[in-house]
Amino acid sequence: MRAVLAGIAAAVIVSTTALAAGKLAPSEIQATFFNGQPFTAATPQGIRYKMVFTADGKMTREPVGKSGAKSEGTWKLSKDGYCTTWKNDRQNCFAVLNTSDNKWSIMKGTTAVATWTK
């Protein structure tokens, strides 16, 4: 029984460490994405957007396909990642996890709300 509990505890520590290692610091998010260069965002439902976050705190999104709505808003860094406020919406804050080369999961708490690719 102790061996099983120790194994579970070790697995939790390893997975928590892996998540922490893949989480981008706010300065890394800004340097990688908030530099005026477009990148692609996809929702879990498969809606894709061309996103542009500029250094002055502004952002735009434009649907790549027939679904989704064009919008603009503002962004700011937070202690755990970044926060956005889209036009006519409330502020939401997110963390960014690097999941593979040129692919990041956008997390709201423990839920992945988008995937960013470059």
Image (cartoon, rainbow, N blue to C red):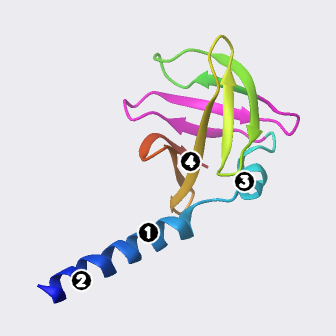
Outermost residue on the right side: it is 56
Q: Indicate left or right for 81 with 8 as reference.
A: right
Tell me the element at label 3. Answer: helix
- Disc nearest the viewer among 4 and 3: 3
Between the residue at mark 4 and the residue at mark 2, the CA separation in whole angstroms equals 35 Å
Which quarter of the picture shows residue 72?
Answer: top right
* Disc 3 target residue: 26
Where are the magenta residues, as a range?
37-58
* Disc 2 target residue: 7
Say what amino acid the circle numbered 1 marks.
Thr
Between the residue at mark 2 and the residue at mark 1, the CA separation in whole angstroms equals 14 Å
Numbered tag placed on residue 117 in the rendering: 4
| Residue sitting at x 48%, y 44% | 109
Tell me the element at label 4. Answer: strand
* Disc 1 target residue: 16
Between the residue at mark 3 and the residue at mark 1, the CA separation in whole angstroms equals 19 Å
Outermost residue on the left side: it is 1
Tell me the element at label 2. Answer: helix
Q: Counting other residues with Cα less than 10 Å from the Cα at mark 2, is it few (<14), some (14-19), or many (20 or more)?
A: few
Which quarter of the picture shows residue 11?
Answer: bottom left
Identify which residue, 53 or 63, lies in the foreground.
53
Q: Position of residue 6 (x, y in %)?
A: 25, 85
| Residue sitting at x 45%, y 33% | 43
Q: Position of residue 59 (x, y in %)?
A: 74, 28
| Residue sitting at x 50%, y 18% | 68
Say what amino acid the circle numbered 4 marks.
Thr
- Disc nearest the viewer among 3 and 2: 2
Considering only order in the chain, which callout, 2 or 4, is on the residue closer to the N terminus? 2
